[in-house]
Amino acid sequence: DLTDVLSSTMDFWVMFPFLVYIAFTLYAVLNVITGIFLETAMESARDEKELFVVFNARNVFQTADSEGNGTITWPDLECRLEHKDVRRFFDAVDIQISEAKALFKLLDVSGDGFI
C-alpha cells in the first residue's frame, strides 16, 4: 500500500501536503472530465432545439398555407395564430404572438404581402 510506504519513510508533515496535492489533482481532473461531458450534452440539447424549431416552423407554414400554393399571406397566418403548433413555434423562438405581424413583415423581403 502506498500510504504504508510513505508513512514509514516520511514524516506526517511531509506526507500530508503530498496527499492534499494528490486529492486536489484528482478533483481537478474529474472536474475537467465532468465539464467536457456537460458541454457535449449542452451542445446536443442546442442541436435538438434547433431541429425542433425548424420542424415547428415547417409545420406552421404548411398549416398557414391554406390554399396549398406555397405562399402565405398575413390573413392566412393571422387566422392560424391560435393553433397550438403556431403557439409552440412562437414560444420556441421567443416571439410573442402580438409580434407576429412584425415577423411576417420581416420574412416578406419583397414587400408583396407573401412569404
Image (cartoon, rainbow, N blue to C red):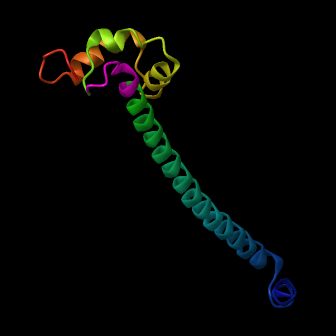
Which residues make up the magenta segment?
Answer: 61-69
Identified at 75% across, 78% down, the residue is 14
- Check if residue 17 falls in the magenta segment: no
Residue 31 in the image: state x and y as whole percent. Answer: 62, 60
Identified at 47% across, 44% down, the residue is 46
Q: Is residue 22 above or below residue 59?
A: below
In the figure, is residue 83 to the left or right of 9?
A: left
Residue 98 picture quarter: top left
The C terminus sits in image quarter: top left
**In the depicted view, which residue is nearer to us: 55 or 44?**
55
Residue 30 in the image: state x and y as whole percent. Answer: 65, 64
Residue 72 picture quarter: top left
Identified at 29% across, 19% down, the residue is 103
**In the depicted view, which residue is nearer to us: 42 or 9?**
42
The N terminus sits in image quarter: bottom right
In the figure, is residue 75 to the left or right of 109?
A: right
In the figure, is residue 67 to the left or right of 84?
A: left
Residue 76 in the image: state x and y as whole percent. Answer: 32, 13
**In the depicted view, which residue is nearer to us: 76 or 5?**
76
Identified at 40% across, 23% down, the residue is 63
Residue 107 in the image: state x and y as whole percent. Answer: 23, 24
Tally the marks.
Answer: 0
